[in-house]
Amino acid sequence: MNTMTSGMRVRWAVATVSALALALLTLNNSDLWDFSAHAAGGGACPANAKPANLNFTLKDVSGRDVRLSSFKGKVVLLDFWATWCEPCKMEIPWFAEFQTKYGSRGFQAIGVSVDDTVEKLKPYVAKYKMNYPVLLGLNHDDIQNAYGPLWGIPVTVLISRDARVCVKHAGISSKQNFEREIEALLTPFD
């Protein structure tokens, strides 16, 4: 005898569909979803890439103003994330590694925490050894809208030295995929 009520079945069905939808959104399958814009031949910036809006100034975790426009001329990995986001926790060590490995070649990782306070961010930044600027995106829908819409996080945008949006990942991608794209953007200038 089944004791589950129809209301409970509906709630479980909604929860199951929601979980599946979230799982699909965190998969970055550009053949299925139009979340990534890759140039044919390996990840360098497509000729029709749109300009990146770098006209934003946000506070970092130390309270200093950081102007995104000051990074023009570098290959920028702009990561929208939050401390509660499990896929974000997987990517952050990769981004710290990329900053160490490629920083001297003109690469800059930047994290924008979409909804955490500075009090929550400071210990997190230390714990995860984030060796790149971490900016407060809380109450800054303007930057999220400029690179969005952000249907979920993480969302990671790769910006070329001439400030064009070359690749956008919605959801987690692979470390190898990010590295291939970063190297493709750095290589013409080495």
Image: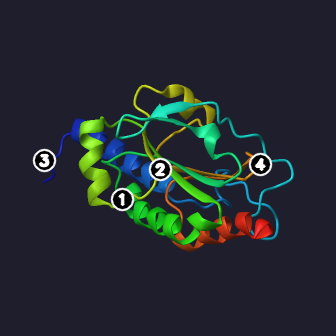
Which amino acid, mark 3?
A: Thr
Residue 3, label in figure: 3
The answer to the question of whether label 3 and label 1 lie on touching residues, with beta carbons closer than 8 A, is: no
The answer to the question of whether label 4 and label 2 lie on touching residues, with beta carbons closer than 8 A, is: no
Residue 89, label in figure: 1
Sequence order check, earlier mark of 3 and 2: 3
Residue depth check, mark 3 versus mark 2: number of the one nearer the observer: 2
CA–CA distance between discs 4 and 2?
24 Å
Which amino acid, mark 2?
A: Pro
What residue does disc 2 label? 154
Residue depth check, mark 4 versus mark 2: number of the one nearer the observer: 4
CA–CA distance between discs 4 and 3?
63 Å
Q: Secondary structure at mark 2?
A: loop
The correct choice, above or below, for 93 with respect to 78 in the image is: below
CA–CA distance between discs 1 and 2?
10 Å
Q: Is residue 139 left or right of residue 11?
A: right
Where on the picture, by quarter, is residue 104?
bottom right
Which amino acid, mark 1?
A: Lys
Viewport quadrant of the N terminus: bottom left
Viewport quadrant of the C terminus: bottom right
Sequence order check, earlier mark of 1 and 4: 1
